[in-house]
Image: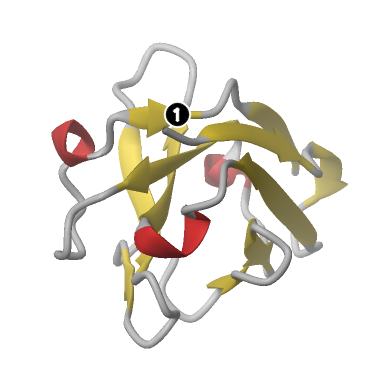
Amino acid sequence: QVQLVESGGGLVQAGGSLRLSCAASGRTFSAYAMAWFRQAPGKEREFVAAISWNGGRTYYADSVEGRFTISRDNAKNTASLQMRSLKPEDTAAYYCAADPGVGLTRNQRSYPYWGQGTQVTVSS
């Protein structure tokens, strides 16, 4: 198993940047694909980005492609989401998730492990 704790959320003006971090506990972090999802008030949780176990493959939602960058450091058991050119519509609770499977997917059901979330608010 793996336990996940997100940090780095906050309030930022439109056009600004934030970097989210996800700290994982457990010795097998490198065996998991990692992903970020987000949920805005009144909306369903949606996929943001995913990264393969070794960082060799990444996958982004169209809405964040070119603005967000997902990365990981297996030596430090962390995954990160660098967010740039933030827009008010990026406002949401952001969650990191871990998938022990070999694929790279946007399907939430493939991720059995979730953090508690961190709030990102982008003001206009």
Percent coordinates x, y for residue 95 in the rendering: 52, 35
Provide the secondary structure element on which disc 1 rests.
strand
Q: Is residue 35 above or below residue 82?
A: above
Q: Is residue 94 visible?
A: no
Q: Is residue 24 visible?
A: yes
* Residue located 31% across and 62% down the image: 61
Residue that sits furthest to the top in the current view? 42
Percent coordinates x, y for residue 112 in the rendering: 28, 30
Q: Is residue 124 above or below residue 83?
A: above
Residue holding disc 1: 114
Q: Nearer the viewer, residue 15 or 103?
A: 103
Picture quarter with the C terminus: top right
Q: Is residue 55 above or below residue 40?
A: below
How many numbered tags mark residues here?
1
Q: Nearer the viewer, residue 39 or 31?
A: 31
Indicate the colouring scheme. Answer: secondary structure
Q: Is residue 9 left or right of residue 31?
A: right
* Residue located 58% across and 34% down the image: 4
Q: Is residue 69 above or below residue 115?
A: below
Q: Nearer the viewer, residue 55 or 26?
A: 26
Corner quadrant of residue 19: bottom right
Corner quadrant of residue 113: top left
Corner quadrant of residue 101: bottom left
Q: Is residue 115 left or right of residue 25?
A: left
Q: Is residue 37 left or right of residue 25?
A: left
Percent coordinates x, y for residue 97 in the rendering: 42, 40
Q: Amino acid at mark 1?
A: Trp
Residue that sits furthest to the front in the current view? 27
* Residue located 75% across and 64% down the image: 15
Picture quarter with the N terminus: top left
Percent coordinates x, y for residue 9 in the rendering: 77, 39
Circle 1 packing at 10 Å, graded few (<14), some (14-19), many (20+), is: many
